[in-house]
């Protein structure tokens, strides 16, 4: 900081500056300048971000990412900076902001227009891109009234393998139609098992569908994204709190057979898993959670013992014998040529049980 002006005058000058880039440049000159300027810099940035809060009435610019979202997405320790936001504008930590109506061009090369305005909260950005420490810090700051399953629109999930089922069976090709995402969905879509565990431990919904996401549950995403280690952990958790889960009926226990908007269950999503042993392990967990391998089939007796000859026939012929077979995991396993899933489903039936 220059020594030829009294500190009081310098602070008065800084306070009069309203250009954020100028103030940011000032913070880079010295540690003393940074300490003197950061409250003013943060206040100006947060004032601008107030216009981006998704209140439904205030319409502000969408071209710059709000400070809280930008910090939450950093792959480094930003808890100190987030603490400053808590000091100056605590509501920004769990507020929903409008974000640019843009799409991931590498994932949507055929799209001829940008999508409409999206929205996200800091927890969404942290679950997609930030660190586990950032996610944990935000969860610790969550107000009682804040929803841990709040939805985000157009936070990227395009690289998630489970979307293959949505595009093939749900026939989705327009970015505008793709499902909204909870923080847990974003963690699962980005294969962030440590973040998913933190969210589930804090009460995130992993077994039930939420509005506007095509009925896709967290369990379906885990199944389609080959997340066997997470399911190993979840199985232990379910067993340890089975009684409570059944009493309050609020999470995954008892919902293993829930269907998405296209009639698919988590057992159907497993057919996307290319690794045979991993796919078989996921099937075992889903059956252990209570999923019935024959649920929804019009003619389940055709898969009675011995079952092997049924799978040697062309699946179109099988479909003619059972009008609802497309709603079964057998159909999708055959359609996607996943022999490991078929074999594991057969083992369940050969054992005389359709669920454990």
Image (cartoon, rainbow, N blue to C red):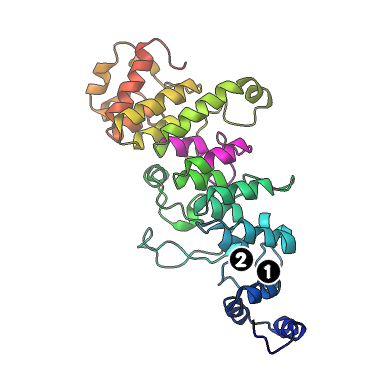
**Which residue is pictured at 61% across the width and 66% down the height?**
67
Of all residues, the one furthest to the front in this rendering is 3
The residue carrying mark 2 is 67
Asked whether the residues under the numbered discs 1 and 2 touch, taking CB atoms below 8 Å apart as contact, a structural biologist would say yes
Examine the structure image and report whether residue 113 is included in the region drawn in magenta: no
**Which residue is pictured at 39% across the width and 63% down the height?**
105
Q: Which residues are magenta?
A: 196-223
The residue carrying mark 1 is 46
Separation of residues labelled 1 and 2 (CA atoms): 7 Å
**Which residue is pictured at 48% across the width and 40% down the height?**
193
Examine the structure image and report whether residue 207 is included in the region drawn in magenta: yes
Residue 16 falls left or right of residue 169 = right
Callout 2: SS: helix
Measuring from the top left, give residue 288's x and y in whole percent.
47, 21
Measuring from the top left, give residue 328's x and y in whole percent.
40, 28
Q: Is residue 325 visible?
A: no
Of the pair 8 and 214, the residue shown nearer to us: 8
> In terms of image quadrants, where is residue 223?
top left
How many numbered badges does the structure rendering display? 2
Q: Residues within 10 Å of mark 2 (few under 14, many from 20)?
A: some
**Which residue is pictured at 35% across the width and 30% down the height?**
279
């Amino acid at each position: 900081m220059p020594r030829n002006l009294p500190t009081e005058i310098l602070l008065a000058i800084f306070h009069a500056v309203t250009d954020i880039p100028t103030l940011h440049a000032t913070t880079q000159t010295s540690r003393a300048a940074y300490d003197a300027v950061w409250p003013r810099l943060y206040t100006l940035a947060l004032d601008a971000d107030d216009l981006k809060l998704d209140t439904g009435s205030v319409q502000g610019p969408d071209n710059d990412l709000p400070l809280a979202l930008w910090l939450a997405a950093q792959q480094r320790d930003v808890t100190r900076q987030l603490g400053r936001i808590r000091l100056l504008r605590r509501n920004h930590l769990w507020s929903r902001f409008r974000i640019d109506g843009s799409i991931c061009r590498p994932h949507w090369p055929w799209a001829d227009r940008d999508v409409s305005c999206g929205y996200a909260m800091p927890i969404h950005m942290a679950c997609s891109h930030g660190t586990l420490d950032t996610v944990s810090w935000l969860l610790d700051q969550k107000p009682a009234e804040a929803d841990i399953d709040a939805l985000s629109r157009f936070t990227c999930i395009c690289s998630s393998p489970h979307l293959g089922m949505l595009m093939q069976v749900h026939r989705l090709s327009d970015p505008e139609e793709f499902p909204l995402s909870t923080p847990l969905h974003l963690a699962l879509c980005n294969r962030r098992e440590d973040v998913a565990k933190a969210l589930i431990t804090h009460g995130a919904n992993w077994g039930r569908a939420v509005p506007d996401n095509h009925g896709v549950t967290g369990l379906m995403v885990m199944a389609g994204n080959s997340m066997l280690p997470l399911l190993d952990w979840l199985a232990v958790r379910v067993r340890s709190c089975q009684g409570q889960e059944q009493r309050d009926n609020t999470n995954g226990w008892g919902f293993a057979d829930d269907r998405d908007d296209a009639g698919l269950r988590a057992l159907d999503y497993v057919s996307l898993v290319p690794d045979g042993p991993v796919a078989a392990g996921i099937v075992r967990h889903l059956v252990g959670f209570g999923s019935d391998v024959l649920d929804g089939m019009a003619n389940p007796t055709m898969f009675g013992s011995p079952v092997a000859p049924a799978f040697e026939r062309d699946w179109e012929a099988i479909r003619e014998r059972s009008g609802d077979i497309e709603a079964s995991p057998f159909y999708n396993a055959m359609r996607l040529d996943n022999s490991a899933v078929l074999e594991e489903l057969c083992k369940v039936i050969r054992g005389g049980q359709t669920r454990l």
